[in-house]
Amino acid sequence: MAEEYDLVILGGGTGGYVAAIRASQLGLKTALVEKGKLGGTCLHKGCIPSKALLRSAEVYAQTKHSEEFGVLTSDVSVNFTKVQERKGKIVDQLHKGVQHLMKQGKIDVYEGLGRILGPSIFSPMPGTISVEMNNGEDNAMLVPKNVIVATGSRPRTLPGLEIGGKVMTSDEALSMEEIPASIIIVGGGVIGIEWASMLADFGSDVTVIEYADRIIPTEDKEISKEMQRLMKKKGVKIVTSAKVLPETLKQGDTVAISAEVKGEQKEFTAEKVLVSVGRQANVEGIGLENTDIQVEKGYIATNEYFQTKESHIYAIGDVIGGLQLAHVASHEGIVAVEHIAGENPHPIDYDLVSKCIYSAPEAASVGITEDQAKEKGFKVKTGKFSFKAIGKALVFGESDGFVKIVADEETNDILGVHMIGPHVTDMISEAGLAKVLDATPWEVAHTIHPHPTLSEAIGEAALAVDGKAIHG
Ligand code: FAD
């Protein structure tokens, strides 16, 4: 039996389920097809479980230093089973929340593997979705006017570096039963650094091997440098300009792998290896060959409203590449749905998207880096303010890091804001709003920041752009 819909969404991750809710709000008859669990990578294998583990690690690390706050504790230790249980409870609670939202929006959820069919008896156009149901029932046949492909991504691996045994990606690492005594993390990007921070705080001996000449290489250079200093301070060993040689992998009681570091081959040994070298789009097995949809460099190609070459089939989220972030996926979903509904949405300005790293300390940014601004030909001026001069940071006992604002000397526009330090992932939205509203550093500085708060560092950095910081 074929069921007709205004919209069928393939993939119920952050992109897909948010798109479904927006579609229901706009009165579209909507179905969501999910082969695994609603909430996708972010809820089950990404943002939420990793942040739950990071929080436990942070509490442990802070409790070990509680004497500094005049709080005396003894025999502080980690029960990793409980850490994992706490993570599981948070994920379950949010999963139930998403299931409830689907019911509330009267969205039909099909639990199974969806595949796009070509022109068929159901429709002269490609886009009918056949669902191989998880419960073994006959395939469901969904005939939509529009489709959104939101099939997400999976961990990328290095050719020749087999995952298994002591070698993991973040998928396997999230369900580790014990904290490894030592670990090699291949890749010092966002995910690698979050894991490095967490495992070091839990007491692991962590080595990060990064191909570029600095960790978190897409961030402003000064942020990378400060992150490297602070990771080293907590004991993380960082090897940069290092090319891992997968063929050298040896697994036994421990695991060993070599890397070419500045022309020299070096061997690293640990209890586990975590490979965090990026994410690969899920474009296979979803029937793209039955359509004119184009895949470029591994990602589905779309226009600014997320239409593929088949204008009634859209694609959003990790499967289209770009910034592979949950908030980007969901926003793309909203734009796609509003376009389908004829609402004339604004295309996304990716320059206005905030990016966060949830290590301890955190890092966050919006806009372009100082180097990118110079490459684009801007006459750059910067303002920087350290958390060392922020009362609230001293009260917290977390005064490492700074806020840096990159501005255009000629127009006074804010080009980028870069932060590293306590709770900066919660503070970056002020900078995001400043960018959206095209605020000048002066306007940011004259938004009176309450005292004592960490956000005072933003106001001071804005004043520092013109050399007028009060406390610096
Ligand atoms: P996904 O969340 O991957 O969802 C795709 C869904 O489609 C999956 O549920 C999958 O089962 C389903 N699917 C695939 N194929 C089919 C099919 N044929 N039929 C039916 N269903 C199908 N982002 C942040 O913004 N903040 C963070 O802190 C953050 N932390 C992260 C930490 C880790 C360790 C990882 C791995 C990622 C993290 N991310 C974070 C990235 C974030 O998880 C992704 O950007 C986001 O999940 C992308 O959403 P999506 O909807 O495009 O895809």
Image: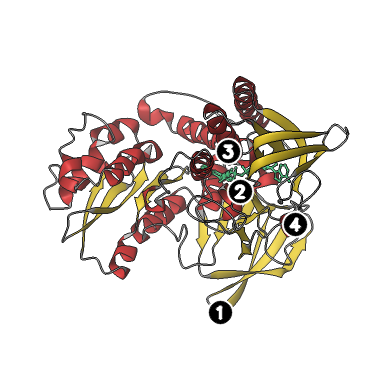
Of the image marks 2 and 4, the number of the one nearer the N terminus: 4
Q: CA distance from mark 2 to mark 4?
A: 14 Å
Residue carrying label 4: 290
What residue sits 46% from the left and 57% below the top? 216
Q: Nearer the viewer, residue 96 or 257?
A: 96
Disc 3 under 8 Å from ligand 1? The reply is: yes
Residue carrying label 3: 14
What residue sits 50% from the left and 31% below the top? 59
Residue carrying label 2: 312
In the image, which is nearer the foreground, mark 2 or mark 1?
A: 2
Q: Secondary structure at mark 1?
A: loop
Q: Amino acid at mark 4?
A: Asn
What residue sits 70% from the left and 57% below the top? 291
Q: Secondary structure at mark 3?
A: helix
Residue 280: quarter of image: bottom right
Marks 1 and 3: CB-CB under 8 Å? no
Marks 3 and 2: CB-CB under 8 Å? no
374 to 311, vertically: above or below: below
Of the image marks 1 and 3, the number of the one nearer the N terminus: 3
Q: Nearer the viewer, residue 268 or 328?
A: 328
Of the image marks 4 and 3, the number of the one nearer the N terminus: 3
Please tell me how crowded label 2 is: few (under 14), some (14-19), or many (20+) other residues with Cα within 10 Å. some
